[in-house]
Amino acid sequence: MTTPDWFVYQGVGEPHDGIDRLPAPPPWRNFDGEPVIERPPPLGTESTRRLGTRGLRGIAWRPVELELINAALYLRRPLLVTGDPGSGKSTLAHALAYELGLGRVLHWPIVSRTTLRDGLYTYDAIARLQDMQMARAAGERYTEDIGDYLRLGPLGTALLPHARPRVLLVDELDKSDIDLPNDLLNALEEGEFGITELQRIARRTAEAEVLTDDGRRAPVREGRVRCRAFPIVVMTSNGERDFPAPLLRRCIHLDLPSPRDDEWGTARLETMVRAHFGEAGLPATDSLVRAFLQSSPGSLRAADQLLNAIYLTQEAVRDSEPDRLRLAELLMRPLDQGGHGAR
């Protein structure tokens, strides 16, 4: 397939300068946060682990999937990525960061107790009080730097005024309580948020440095964080709940089908196998890939099951092809059949 000229993310699996060709945002998605953070963060080990370091040739995206991904980049809208476990939802965030040279992915895993504040920032009031008491006990003057007790979360770090967008992975949003999707939508629509503890002292301290989710320090002016380059937001869902209409209409929805027996399903699985086991591992695993794709069409499976089966059969049953297939079939049983529960 010839890649259209307007694609910023091409899905080739090799770093390039495509993000620098991204045009200015629509007027209604233009942000002007300061002070600008120019230095990009280094690529995280999680991204290289997810994508593999051997034989990386990019994930086999369908043309319509690449169109939706690039539409989200142009429009500065979050991507809501749905699909069964193992369909590649989380991998997309790491692929974007790797190919576009945007550094470490900011990962925000969601559980039922997660609140918007968890993603924005935390304030360690207890540590601050302990430091004050220790200074007094030692007869020393306590010099306060409130920024030492504030740490931005993944969402808060993504909304800093970066010159180039950060990639934020909001993982398994469907596990949240009923309020979080709308709260998150409001924060992303505004592109900014206030830090109450800094706003209280903003008249005395115009700028403070706070810790970020990736272990650096960043300046915050007058207790308010406002983005400049809108982050690339990938929100994943396994389909365990429906989302409110306001969230859906402000996102670009990308549904990733489970791997199936066609050219795209085969190519996507081969890419995953190559990334984890190298080019040399492909011939020996071809029969397991075919078995994964062809058995029980329509049943729920995760790519992790295939990777587990490949690893175990390579290490435990190398010489007998019938035994390899039998053991692999045990590990690759459908999640929605035979006593398994779908996640």
Image: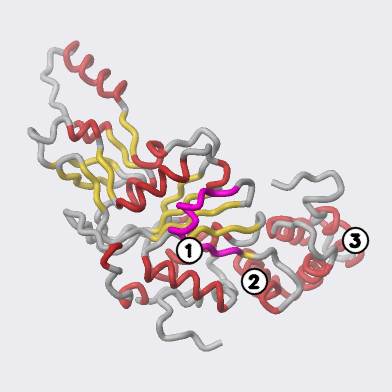
Residue 325: where, in percent of width, then height? 87, 63
Name which of mark 3 and mark 2 comes first in the sequence.
2
Task: Say whether residue 283 is magenta.
Answer: no
Which residue is found at the position 89% from the left and 59% from the top?
A: 326
- Which residue is identified by label 3? 323
252 left or right of 264?
A: left
**Circle 1: element type:** strand
**CA separation, marks 3 and 1?**
45 Å
Residue 252 numbered mark, or none? 1
Q: Nearer the viewer, residue 44 or 125?
A: 125
Q: Nearer the viewer, mark 2 or mark 1?
A: 1
252 left or right of 212?
A: right
**CA separation, marks 2 and 1?**
22 Å
Which residue is found at the position 35% from the left and 47% from the top?
A: 187
Q: Nearer the viewer, residue 272 or 281?
A: 272
Mark 3 and mark 1 in contact? Answer it, CB < 8 Å: no
**Circle 2: element type:** helix
Furthest toward the left, the residue is 204
Name which of mark 2 and mark 1 comes first in the sequence.
1
| Residue type indicated by callout 3 | Asp
Give the magenta part as a residue range: 242-255
194 left or right of 257?
A: left
Location of residue 64 with respect to 130 vertically, above or below? below
- Which residue is identified by label 2? 268
